Image (tube, rainbow, N blue to C red):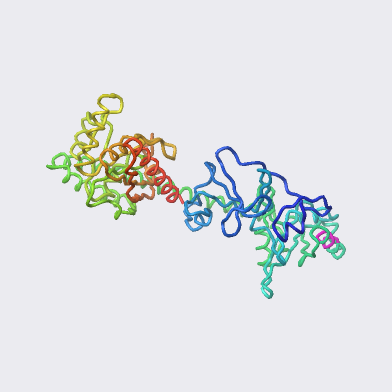
Amino acid sequence: IARETFEAERRAVASQDASALRFVACGRALPGHEVRIVDDTGHPVPERVEGQLEFRGPSATSGYWRAPELTARLFTDDQGLWLDTGDRAYQAEGDVFVTGRVKDIVIRGGRNLYPQEIEEAVGEVPGVRKGCVAVFGRRDPKTGTERLVVLAEVSPRASRDTAALREAVAVAVMSSIGEPADEILLVPPHTVLKTSSGKVRRSACRSLVEQGNLGTGLASVRAQWLRLAGGAIVLRLGYARQAVAGVWFALRALALFGLMAPVAWLITVLLPSPVAAWQFCHRAARMLLRWTGLELEVQGLEHLPTDTRCVLVCNHASYLDGLVLVAALPRPHTFVAKRELEHQRIAGRFLKRLGVAFVERFDPKRSVADAQHMTQAAQSGPPLLVFPEGTFVAAPGLLPFRLGGFLAAAHAGVPVVPLTLSGTRQLLGAERWWPCKARLSVRIGAPLLAEPSLAPFAAAVQLRDQARRVITRSLRLNET
């Protein structure tokens, strides 16, 4: 493509000129994914115009680990769907042409200069170690503009005549981009920093220059071995400390649960009403979490309706989801659980006293009757609390949502309140009985209502889809 047009106007115009830029087509988006090119304001640009490369799809990351500010910058739209790749690119006939990383492109005099092209040209100079050249921009504190810096490793033999080599590098840069470099730094081998895969770390090289650490030389082999051994020992000690802390937490949590569970069960089954049982279990659950050193964050209590009925739906991730929800919700709610639990000698009596509603999963006739009972309960009793996934597995993510709770809300004409539970899978996931310390949170979303004109089944489907989107988005935020 035409160099001057692209560098000045960001337009990719075909050209057969010897100085033309060359970019390789990366193909089209994978099935189920979308890509787009946008300008600095976030608006899509026409074909063959360079801009920011963004994509969305199932392969997109949910964000940075415990770095919400970085995650917020990663997603460019209000819905958090389009992910900024950090690359500049343009599209032509459906293919994506990546032109460079945003952080690596040097802007000088209104032109975008691409380091890869300059590095390849300098690498061809005799005496320069091929693949050991870093080109980057360095801000000039006096003028406020970027200076073009070329950092090139030279072989020991060529380093004897640095003046001639510097001149050859300058000519290569001029021939490549039509402009001179502001700084040419010739350094000994192994100075240019790279990743483990051999990729030049331009930002790290810039920091090396700005900190004045060029030419310090490599440490001796013995010093490197000592540094590696020391780092490994420190790392192992950290792992050992974490393991001891994990064992101590698990033993303490199991001991406290073993001591409190029988007492809490006995008091609960002896209490006169489900309301009294809920209030007692609410206090006991919060006490257990506090004594085991677990912090529970509850957000959005103001979204729980106080003057109307509702159906609460929550993701299911652990054996302890019920305990955490009882600790989080101050007012009584009616859990919906599988009927198999009703006939268990210990769990059944406890759950009945809490006012749990049992539903049939396998008998169609009884399932219809249970659905009618759920609708009546949603209209008259305490708010229903449903796990629409029906079960949980060890793998993270949401299972398909069943329609039962949403049908009850649609028939009863009450809103659905989505709850997002985080941390319980890490605390005690499926097929595991050894607890691990985790950060627990319950995020309560705004009530959802279906369109009044929809039939009950269509309204239930709409409520299910809305609730799933809210819970998915909240899980993504909690992961970061």
Q: Residue furthest front?
A: 453
Q: Is residue 400 above or below residue 327?
A: above
Is 19 left, or right, of 139 in this rendering? Answer: right
Answer whether residue 340 is magenta in the image: no
Q: In terms of depth relative to the viewer, which is nearer, 406 or 450? A: 450
Residue drawn at (70%, 65%) of the image: 110
Q: In terms of depth relative to the viewer, which is nearer, 301 or 280? A: 301
The x, y position of residue 407, in whole percent, is 30, 36
Is 27 left, or right, of 416 in this rendering? Answer: right
Q: In terms of depth relative to the viewer, which is nearer, 251 or 45? A: 45
Magenta span covers which residues? Answer: 168-173
Number of marks drawn: 0
Answer whether residue 67 is visible to the viewer in this image.
yes
The x, y position of residue 56, in whole percent, is 54, 46
Answer whether residue 317 is visible to the viewer in this image.
no
Residue drawn at (30%, 53%) of the image: 303
The x, y position of residue 128, in whole percent, is 81, 55
**Figure quadrant of residue 50:** bottom right
The x, y position of residue 97, in whole percent, is 68, 48
Q: Is residue 453 above or below residue 366?
A: below
